[in-house]
Image: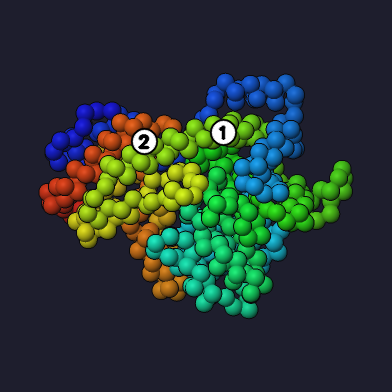
Amino acid sequence: MSGLHKTVGDLAIFGGKPAFAEALHVGRPNLGNRQRLLERINDILDSRWLTNHGRYVAEFERRVAEVTGVAHCVAICNGTVALEIAIRALNLRGEVIVPAFTFIATAHALQWQGIQPVFCDIDLLTHNLDPAQVERLITPRTTGIIGVHVWGRSCEVERLEDLARRHHLGLLFDAAHAFACSHHGRMMGSFGDAEVFSFHATKFANTFEGGAIVTNNSELAARIRLMKNFGFAGKDHVVCLGTNGKMSEVSAAMGLTALESLEEIIAVNRRNYELYRAGLAELPGIRLVAYDPAQKNNYQYIVLVVDSAEVGISRDDLVRILHAENVIARRYFYPGCHRMEPYRSCCPQDGASLARTDLLSQSVISLPTGTAVAPETVQAICGIVRLVVAHRREVQRRLEPRSSEGATAA
C-alpha cells in the first residue's frame, strides 16, 4: 500500500500513484487452515474416493444442517445447479415470481427449464422482494415464488410464506448470501419449502465451487437426492429424471475447513464492517448498508448506497476513481436481470414496473472485505472516499473533460 492521498491531485485517476500496488477484489477467497485442508486432500487421494457421495460430502452435509438447524442438507456441485434441482423438485412451472435485483443465475435457473421468471420490484429499505408487489403479480399461471436474502438480510419471510400458503404456491429462497445468518433468532435455511446456499469461491465460506439445498421436508429431500444423482435409487435402478449435481470430495474438504474457521472469518468481516461504518460516517449522500446486531450476520458484503445528486459525484464515477486506485469495487446487481438477455428482448415491458430496482442498481457499490483485507486497508479505502466527497466539486470539474473525451471517442 502506498502513502495516503492528501489532495485530489494525488488520486490515481488524475495521475497520482495508486493507493494499492495490487488489485483488491470483492469476494477474494477465505482459505481457512491450509494445513488442515491439505491433510484432508491427502486422505482423499489415499482413499481414491474422489466423488459419488464419499465421507467428506456426508460430513459436510451434516455440519451445514447443524449450522442452519434443518433436518436435511444435500450438497450440490454449485449454487446454480442447486437452484435448478430445487425448482424441478418443487415441480415449479409456468411462471415464478423473482426479484430482478439479484444475480442473473436466479432468473436463468428458471428460464433454463422453460419457466418464465416474472420480475418483481423490491423494497428500497430492505433491498428484498416487496410482498405487496408479489401479490399483485400472482396469476393463474403462477406456481411459485423465489425470494432472495440480499446481503444476507432476510426477506419478509412470514409475509411470503403467508402468500404462498394462501395461493398454493411453492416457496424457495435463494440464500446464496445468507449462510450463518438468522431471522428473528431462527437460522436461515429453515424457511419456505427449501433454501439454496452458494459455497462459491467468492462466498465467505466456500467449497471452491459448490452449493447446497436445505429443507425440513423429508419427502422433498429424498427427491432432491435422487435428482442430483441422475435419478438413481440404487445400482442400475433409475426411478426419475435427474442430472449430475454431485459435490466432489475435495470441494467438501474445503467446505469443512471453512466451517472450522467460520467464527474467525465472521469476526474479521465484522471488524471490517465496523471500520467501514466509522470511516464513512456522516458523509453526505453515502449510506453504508447496516446489519441488525440482534441477528446473526456473516457481514460478507460491505455495500454503499450512493445518492449521486447529494454527493455531487455519480456512482459510476466513484467506481472509476476506486478502480484507478486498484480498489475493484463492484456494481451489484447492475443493471438488473430485466435489462440483461434474454429478458431485455423477450419482456421489454418489465422495466416499467421495476423503478425501485433500477434506482438501486444504479446506486450500489460493494467494497472489498474478508480475511485478505487488513484494517489499514479499510481505513485507506475510507480515506479515498472521504477525500472524493470532501472535494467533490473539484473532482467533478477534473472528471468532466475525461467524460467528454470518452463520449467523443465513442
Q: Is residue 309 visible?
A: yes
Residue 8, x across and y down, in percent: 14, 41
Residue that appears at 52% across and 35% down:
263
Q: What kind of residue is marked 1? A: Ala
Kind of element beneath mark 1: helix
Q: Which amino acid does label 2 sit on?
A: Leu
Query: Which badge, 2 or 1, comes first in the chain's sequence?
Result: 2
Q: Name the residue under label 1.
A: 258
Placement of the C terminus among the 4 image quadrants? bottom left
Regarding mark 2 in the picture, which secondary structure is present there? strand
Few, some or many residues within 10 Å of mark 1 (<14, 14–19, 20+): many
Along the line of sight, which residue is nearer the eye, 255 or 339?
A: 255
User: Circle 2: is it few (<14), some (14-19), or many (20+) Cα within 10 Å?
Assistant: many
Q: In this view, does 38 lie above or below 97?
A: above
Q: Is residue 279 left or right of residue 185?
A: left
Tell me residue 170's x, y (percent): 65, 66
* Picture quadrant where residue 17 is located: top left
105 vs 168: above or below: above
Residue drawn at the location 69% of the way across and 22% of the way down = 43
Residue 223: horizontal and vertical position, in percent?
Answer: 76, 54
Q: Which of 227 and 261 is in front in this view?
A: 261
Name the residue located 74 percent from the left edge and 52 percent from the top edge: 221
Q: Which residue is drawn at 58% across and 35% down?
A: 259
Q: Which of 298 and 170 is in front in this view?
A: 298
Q: Which residue does the numbered mark 2 point to in the structure image?
A: 24
Can residue 342 be seen? no
Label 2 to label 1: alpha-carbon separation: 21 Å
Instruction: Pick the quarter of the image with the N terminus.
Output: top left
- Residue sticking out furthest to the bottom: 140
